[in-house]
Amino acid sequence: WDQYKFCQLDLDKALGEPADNLPRVHCDDMSPAEFVERFENPALPCIIQGCMDKWPAMNAWTHKWLRETFKDSKLKCGEDDDGDKVKLRLKHFMRYMELQQDDAPLYTFDADYGDAGKETRAMLDDFDVPEYFREDLFQYSGEDDRPPYRWFLAGPKRSGSSIHIDPLATSAWNAVISGRKRWVLFPPGTPKSAIKPARWLDRPDHEAIDWFLYELAGIREALPEHQQPLELYQYPGEIIYVPGGWWHTVLNVEDSIAITQNFCSTACFPAVWLDTRKSRTKLARRWLRALKPIRPDLYEITCNLAGDGSGKITPEDDLDDLLEEKRRRKEKKKQKKRQDKESRKRKERSFMEHVPSVYMRKEKKKQKKRQDKESRKRKERSFM
């Protein structure tokens, strides 16, 4: 866990100053309509300041308060080798955060903290979703059916999230309560092979700190001008907006507390719909049923995107076709598995039928020996 002694590094010196090439805008200087025009429609990231000034969380969510208020609440801080959640009581994790010297520490990234019946649900009262991100179209799919969308983050220094694109083409906002984060973002269309080099993929663990220390500089040099990354520090009280499709990675350079949410708005609905209909087809069908009477304008978009986009098929039929295609592929895989199993059995039977005569003679000798031994035992019993 501490093989490379990263805890001895001054991360600011080791990484150098970021380009700080992301626009920062105060909420007093930008209306929701201006945000859509300047950043959401063109899908450009930005930092928004001022939205968090009146959040109770900014004063209340100290390490001590979290440790004492939600001490026995278990939150996710990782996964085991089988992909199952690893959870710790918050009092233990906060203590770990203060004392750890790990190269790549555990990172609390919990999606269930706001669920009904959980003690940590009270956290939802300590902040407001900024007005720029309140349109949340996935709410119409139902709270129980929608994909995970909000997380509480407690990140020790040197922890982070590895380079990725958010699921289902959704956009996201991330608000820092305390600590400092370093971000790197790459525009849509940047090749995955450039951002995740083969040498990086060959590593046993894909930790954010390794990527920042060993890969970022080389990636900058290899990419053309139009694919150069946006880099910045995010400070307490700042919210970063990350449009769908942007590659990004985050490193906590200080112990950090934050919240983040993913969302789908009208501006990004076409991309989100295309991704959802393909990867979460059953969810898309339920979502479509809910959207049709409420948002006929969005239903019209799904009509234009159905099938090959020619308008010859309804979105309902398009989803049914996709589900049927998935069912056929699944059945084909099962059939292939059964065929492979039967093929192995045939090969085993064929082998046994055509084993070399030497092997058969040995087996016959063993069988004769067993029979002779049993015969002697019967004779002994008869004599006695």
Image: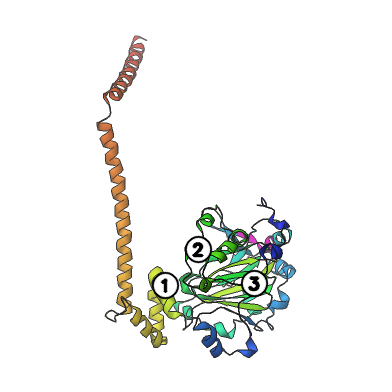
Circle 2/circle 3 CB separation < 8 Å: no
Q: Badge 1, how many Cα within 10 Å: few under 14, some, many 20+? A: some
Question: Which residue sits at x=64%, y=72%?
Answer: 258
Residue at mark 3: 258
Question: Which residue sits at x=38%, y=73%?
Answer: 277
Mark 2 element type: helix
Q: Give residue 104's mark.
A: none
Residue 151, x across and y down, in percent: 58, 70
Question: Which residue sits at x=28%, y=79%?
Answer: 313
Residue at mark 2: 194
| Left or right, 136 with reference to 287 | right
Q: Up-down: is 99 above or below 59?
A: above
Q: Badge 3, how many Cα within 10 Å: few under 14, some, many 20+? A: many
Residue at mark 1: 275
Amino acid type of the residue that numbered disc 1 sits on in the rendered structure: Asp
Q: Nearer the viewer, residue 351 or 199?
A: 199
Amino acid type of the residue that numbered disc 3 sits on in the rendered structure: Ala
